[in-house]
Amino acid sequence: MSRKHDVNKEIENEVYCGTLPVLPKERKYGFIDALLVLSGYCIATWSYTQGSYLATLVGFKQLLIGAFLAAIFMLMIYQLPVIMSARYGIDIWIWLRSVFGPAGNKIVTIIIIVVNFPWYAVCCELFADSMENLLGLFGIQLFNGAHIILSLSCVIIGTIIALRGVSTITWTTRILVPLLLLVGVAVVIVGFTSVPMDVIWNYQPELAGDADKTVNYVLSIEANFAFVITLVGGMAEVPRLCKSEKSSYYAGVLGQGAAGSFFVVVGAVMAIAMQYVTGQMVDDPTLMMATLSAPILGLSSLLLVAFANIGTQAVGSYIYGVMLKSTFKKSSYKILVLVLGLYVAVLCVWGKITEYFGSFLTIGACVYAPLAALLFVDFFLVRKQKIDLKSAYELPGHTAYRYTGGFNIVGIICLALGFGFTLLIFDPINVVIHNKILFMLTPTFASFLFTGILYYLLCRIPFIRDYVICKGPDKKPFDRAKTPPRQNLFFMPFIWLICKFITAPYKLKIDKHNMDGIKPPFLVYGSHNSFMDFYVTPLALKPYRANYISELEGFEAFGEWIYRQVGCLGTRKFINDQYLIKNIMKVIKRGDVMVIYPEARYANVGTNSHLTPSIAKLAKLLKVPVVTINMQGNYLQQPIWNLKERKGARLHADLKCVVTAEEIGKLSVDEILSRISKELTYDEYKYQLENKIVIDDEWRAEGLHFPLYRCRQCGRDFAMTSSGSKITCKYCGDSYEMDELGQLHSSSGEIIHIPDWYEWQRGFVHEECREGKYKLDIPVKIWALPNSVNFVDCGEGRLVHDNSGFSLEFDNYRSGQRETLKFPASSMVSIHTEYDYRGLYGPCVTLSTYDDTFFIYPTDESRDVFNPTKIQFATEFLGGLYT
Amino acid sequence: MEPNKEIETRIEEVLKAEKENKIPRMTKRDYIIAAVITAIALIGIIGGFFL
């Protein structure tokens, strides 16, 4: 039980670390550990395949140069950016989001896995071959289909090890690598002692008549470049776990350049020796051992090589599993590892992977060379070793790497051109050289240089550089003066269809009163309960199109273009926005309907707020009929304190002309306000009770403690908590059950109407304000919303609220200074509040200037005393909305 | 902890650690050594053409 639990926890932790920055104290690997893990990854039977392939191209001395020096040369360059992984504790797949954009990165990740993972099928094939060959030496003949079963067994065992997590992988490699080195040494000894030393040292391949020695040498260098560069994807996860930049870098260089290359040379020695003895080149160490020394040595090596194949399969599945997990965050690590295993299994069943291995390797190098170049140039020359981590993790308000719909067009174009450039030099499938001069650089290195230089030069062009580097969030203020377009005619059918579809489950009924002969232009004032208002209103106003006033955060959430097309006018809450008035006049002048929700905030407990005379003054200014839309059930369906939808809610709306065009000039402001206020008076719980609307969700009271924060029994503020259908005092235990008709029942049988409790609290806040005792002075977190594009993180600040109003002290991103903004009490009749903003960020209030809306959240320290409802009560009293 | 907050907290810790040099950086000397090794490897590769 405990073992199972530990393994699961280990996997979860590792996957967690695979997606989150690893803190310095969590780093597991010193140089040796990282070297062993990476060596374990590089040492595999494909090294023998590579060695025997090189032996067909060049002599032993050139082979040594290629295997070691070419590998180290390429590794020294392309491994250098891994120091970023060690520095920030992230893998390169997180950082690649800056190079390709988050969406582009997903595509690149999939491409890499598709071109890379066939390596593991080769491993499994070689494992099956070894087993068959050795058993054959002992005279054991296997049945038909045994080969597939053997190769699949390698997949299955490797996948199981990968599922057991990083500790098992680490221990696997700790045992595996030293043993494999021993096997390598044994192969070298057997190889060199079975044949005269000078046979190997002076080995030269038998070249075909038209073969060019220089071309073959370049091909061997190219093979080594391709061999090491295609492993970058698999090795990318390890450096973030290293304790220093140097250890991460040199572990990568030596893991491949020394340990990996050693095994390539071992493979070459084996192949040369076998050719000398038997006249046939082989890439199977077990066969070589059995042939050149004794079957028992073959048997010993078989066990170790089998372990190596399985170990490689395991390490590969683990590394690519974590890589996929960091890209596709919502997917399960286990499922991803199983999918990878399935991919390899399918290739094994296909059975032709060894035949097509060369194609996979070459195509892989065509992708990896430009990728490695982009990593190098981007890190050192373009971003100069600085990455915006919050943007890389796509945190709210950090959109530096969002680029164009999630794609960095520049990075993706360079990758594609780099890929194409390789193919322009050399056709790897038919082995045809198209450009001999560039071929001398090797196709991989030429592509690396081409892509790196191209990307660098492109990033020297100012507008491309601005696009790629994207220095932080957009801080340009929203253009409030911009004339809003009419609601898009082509959108109208879709808007009505969507509204109908969304309101249908709640059986919306719309009643129209005094609306005969009322045609646009006219002004609509609506009650404001939830987002459902925006679905009900268009249906009530059908067939007319309308414009709506919306806070900028809606523009940010859905996109400015869409919001403009559906007819929204952007503004900020509780400011004197003269441009908004001008735009409203433009809407009316062009003969449309203007919809305003004058409360400017959702109802906290389903009851209306007081309205100000300004709405009546606006009506008189516009000189058009005034229509009200009072919507019932919208709050019940999705109250602001818990945004889960209540299926039992029923919707109803009354659309009524309250002031005609003839009356607008004659009636006084007070009279108009009185008529509007009368029609926009509502009580959702009363509506629920009268219409016996049953809302029986078990969680129906969860969140109710946000608006009902004061205990009715002990009188303490911020005392309430809610769970299921109950709201309870944390201190005295006083508890109330919310029934299915929205009424609260105390244990003593008292029935409480929720709005009564809400208003009862308001009285205490008013009293505090009158006595001058009201004061809030707390640390807060602040995000500014300057426009429709993004939020800007302003860090921590201090919010003070008292009888004089609000003051907000923070680091103003516009001036770069620590500043205190003042919001006089008389300037705000109310305040925008949220109880769990976007279901993610918890409670907040907002304060606005003309150019910014500041979303203000409590810190951990102030969370217990930060209640948006109480702040709102005080603001409304001090602003004169309530007396 | 809520995922975004967890990431944010970790990022802040990592950036702080970077400033405090808790993960030892590659020094100028290290870069020079790396460049020398790279140059030697390149010379070796070029030398291979003459074998």
Image: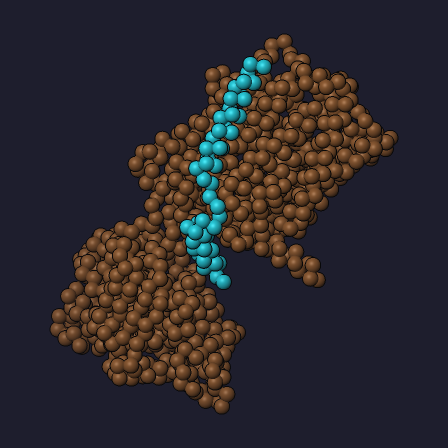
Q: Residue furthest front?
A: B29
Q: The brown chain is which one?
A: A
Q: Which chain is cyan?
A: B
Q: Between residues A110 and A314, which one lies in front from this camera angle?
A: A314
Say left or right for A362 vs A203: left
- In percent of width and height, residue A101 lies at 43, 43
Q: Residue furthest bottom?
A: A748
Q: Which residue lies furthest to the top in this view?
A: A209
Image mark count? 0
Q: Residue at 69% across / 27% down in the picture?
A: A267
Residue A457: name its quadrant.
Answer: top left
- Up-down: is A421 above or below A23? above
Query: Quadrant location of the C terminus of chain A?
Result: bottom left
- In percent of width and height, residue A254 lies at 58, 35
Query: Quadrant location of the N terminus of chain A?
Result: bottom right
Q: Residue at 30% across / 61% down in the picture?
A: A810
Q: Can residue A402 be seen in this view?
A: no
